[in-house]
């Protein structure tokens, strides 16, 4: 289902300085969308979502601009943004309120950072090789901290105590968590219950467009665990990969990450507040390889904690609703989540494997083995993760580093109150804020 947002492109004619500044940004924004679509012709993963005019996409397909032409145009747009930014610094504050000023400032920064990342992606597609941290800074505007093996060793030592026995820890862990696997035939029921709860919790605090909706599909043979495809008009298709067993904790994780208050809500709020209300055309397109992905993945991961502010609250819901629906014994829920808390502390192990693999310090086989040991993954899961790393490279930092950056940003602004936390979170999901604005 797609609605052409033709009204979006009838820009307001106004004569104030603020409006003139906005006109300049609108022109850059429109060319940026065309550039993203043009680059999508060279990189099939690049355009994650587009719900602007269909003819723009057709145009990109017909023109098939060269990488050189795209790079040159990106450089021209960046120059234009710089010149306009320095020539009219006071224009933005002329006639808009405080939050309006902030939004315009964020919009300009958004365009600048997104276009810089696009230019870097062009250089990479032309053969430029970047080291992991340089790549993540260039594409996602952030660098993940580096951890030595000893950092993970001490977490693993705690896990060893919780899951005693012989053989490698990943093997014992797989055996230990078997009773917590959601049977395939109950997956959709459990997942729908988790979505219902996450949606209700989100709706209690964040107004969503009345016609928002999404569909769930189950897939196989994918390098990712779940994917949200935003179609525009407040509709998403969420795909869940069932190649590997899905355990009970993933139901709420997936529902919150892909749905409420994660990707589906982020995309819907951007469409409502920025595309429809402000007519900011740049948000009709979402380039996957861009700083926006850190905010997208970070908010999607942190969204679970916003929906369930305490661990107790989450476990209570799962014990009462999800465990019975999955036919899993809920008396061991606390034990299960004590282990999951430790497993979560191993998240950065994936970044380390990715950094070493991308930098050529280890090969694919060694990366699989390293993940088995330090991320406690069974071979099939480690292989799936390595495939993900090979395809998406430094994108992996967006999940855990993104989550930590969003958590710090929200907590700094909201104190302890869950209500304030929701309002700050909703504001972030409705703004062009990028990683450098989360500091
Ligand atoms: Zn995601």
Image (spheres, grey):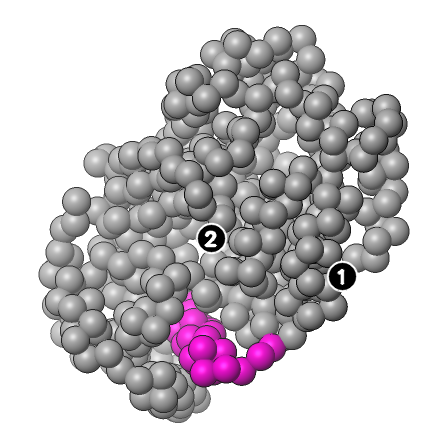
Q: Nearer the viewer, residue 321 or 70?
A: 70
Q: Earlier in the sequence, mark 1 or mark 2?
A: 1
SS under mark 1: loop
Q: Is residue 172 left or right of residue 46?
A: right
What residue lies at 23% left-to-right and 57% top-to-bottom? 51
Q: Residues within 10 Å of mark 2 (few under 14, many from 20)?
A: many
Magenta stretch, main secondary structure class: helix
Mark 2 CB near ligand 1 (8 Å cut)? yes
Give the image location of residue 104, x and y in percent: 38, 69
Name the quadrant containing residue 342: top right
Q: Residues within 10 Å of mark 1 (few under 14, many from 20)?
A: few
Q: Is residue 112 magenta?
A: yes
Q: Which quarter of the rendering shows the C terminus?
A: bottom right
What residue lies at 72% left-to-right and 44% top-to-bottom? 372
Answer above or below: position of 373 versus 197: below
Disc on res. 296: 2
Which region is colored magenta? 105-130
Disc on res. 146: 1
View extreme (front): residue: 365
Answer above or below: position of 177 versus 232: above
Answer above or below: position of 85 versus 51: below
What residue lies at 63% left-to-right and 16% top-to-bottom? 179
**3D distance between C-alphas at marks 1 and 2:** 22 Å
Name the quadrant containing residue 329: top right
């Amino acid at each position: 289902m797609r609605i052409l947002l033709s009204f979006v492109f009838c820009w307001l004619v106004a004569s104030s300085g603020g409006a003139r500044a906005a006109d300049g940004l609108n022109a850059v924004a429109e060319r940026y969308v065309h550039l993203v679509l043009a680059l999508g012709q060279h990189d099939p993963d690049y355009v994650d979502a587009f719900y602007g005019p269909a003819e723009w996409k057709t145009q990109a397909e017909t023109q098939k601009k060269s990488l050189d032409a795209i790079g040159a145009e990106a450089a021209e747009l960046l120059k234009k943004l710089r010149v306009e930014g320095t020539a009219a610094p006071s224009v933005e504050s002329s006639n808009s309120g405080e939050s309006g000023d902030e939004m315009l400032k964020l919009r300009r920064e958004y365009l600048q950072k997104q276009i810089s990342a696009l230019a870097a992606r062009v250089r990479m597609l032309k053969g430029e090789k970047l080291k992991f941290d340089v790549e993540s800074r260039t594409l996602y505007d952030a660098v993940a901290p580096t951890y030595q093996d000893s950092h993970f060793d001490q977490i693993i030592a705690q896990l060893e105590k919780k899951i005693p026995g012989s053989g490698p820890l990943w093997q014992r862990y797989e055996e230990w968590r078997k009773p917590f696997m959601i049977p395939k035939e109950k997956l959709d029921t459990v997942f729908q219950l988790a979505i219902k709860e996450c949606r209700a919790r989100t709706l209690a605090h964040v107004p969503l467009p009345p016609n928002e909706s999404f569909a769930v599909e189950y897939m196989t043979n994918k390098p990712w665990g779940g994917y949200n495809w935003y179609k525009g008009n407040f509709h998403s298709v969420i795909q869940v990969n069932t190649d590997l067993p899905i355990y009970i904790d993933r139901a709420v994780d997936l529902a919150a990450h892909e749905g409420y208050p994660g990707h589906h809500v982020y995309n819907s709020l951007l469409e409502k507040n920025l595309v429809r209300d402000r007519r900011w055309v740049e948000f009709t397109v979402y380039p996957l390889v861009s700083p926006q992905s850190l905010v997208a993945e970070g908010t999607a991961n942190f969204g679970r904690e916003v929906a369930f502010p305490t661990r107790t609250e989450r476990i209570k819901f799962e014990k009462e609703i999800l465990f019975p629906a999955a036919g899993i014994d809920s008396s061991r829920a606390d034990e299960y989540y004590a282990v999951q808390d430790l497993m979560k502390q191993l998240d950065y192990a994936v970044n380390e494997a990715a950094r070493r693999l991308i930098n050529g310090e280890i090969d694919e086989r060694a990366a699989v083995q390293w993940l088995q040991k330090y991320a406690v993954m069974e071979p099939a899961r480690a292989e799936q993760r390595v495939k993900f790393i090979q395809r998406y490279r430094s994108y992996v930092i967006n999940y855990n580093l993104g989550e930590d950056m969003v958590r710090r940003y929200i907590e700094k602004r909201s104190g302890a109150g869950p209500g304030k936390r929701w309002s700050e979170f909703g504001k972030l999901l409705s703004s062009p804020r990028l990683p450098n604005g989360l500091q």
